[in-house]
Amino acid sequence: MDMIGIKVKTKDQITSCIKVLRSYTELSMGEIKQLISSDDYVYECRFVDGKGIKKIISICNDLNAVNVETEIFEHGRTTNIEFLMNLVNTYSEIEADVDRIIDEEIDN
């Protein structure tokens, strides 16, 4: 399954990371610390999960705001927030088109 995930590159600000990540996930402080230390994804979602992608964007922005460097991956390759924002916009446009088509079919 294709996934998008975020890793924390800054390893010396674990407390700041935990504060931010606890507002997005129910992981324990120990679990978050372990994910950061082992260079695993601190949050991940499916490639087609628009809400999850928005959450990754928010996590990235919040961590960057406290001077924590992050790295975003899609399909195992490094990517950036702009790509994710474009992806979310594309999903929103598709959803709007589908809604419009359904409305047209109902009206006919």
Image (cartoon, helix red, strand yellow):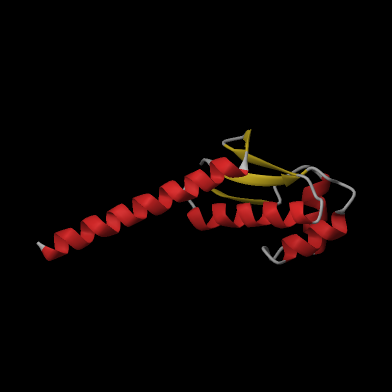
The residue furthest left is 108
Location of residue 44 in the rendering, given as x and y in whole percent from the top left corner: 62, 50
* 33 horizontally vs 27: left or right: right
Could you say where residue 31 lies in the image, as x and y percent from the top left? 78, 57
Q: Is residue 86 left or right of residue 70?
A: left
Q: Is residue 41 above or below residue 22?
A: above
**Is there any visible trace of residue 47 in the rendered image?**
no
At 86% across and 55% down in the image, what residue appears?
14
Which one is nearer the viewer's eye here, 45 or 63? 63
Q: Quadrant of the C terminus?
A: bottom left
Relative vertical location of residue 23 with respect to residue 54 in this rendering, above or below: below
Residue plotted at (68% across, 63% down): 25
Tell how many labels: 0
Percent across and percent down for residue 5 are 63, 46
Name above or below for residue 11 compared with residue 25.
Answer: above
Residue 8 in the image: state x and y as whole percent: 76, 46
Q: Along the horizontal axis of the image, is 84 left or right of 91? A: right
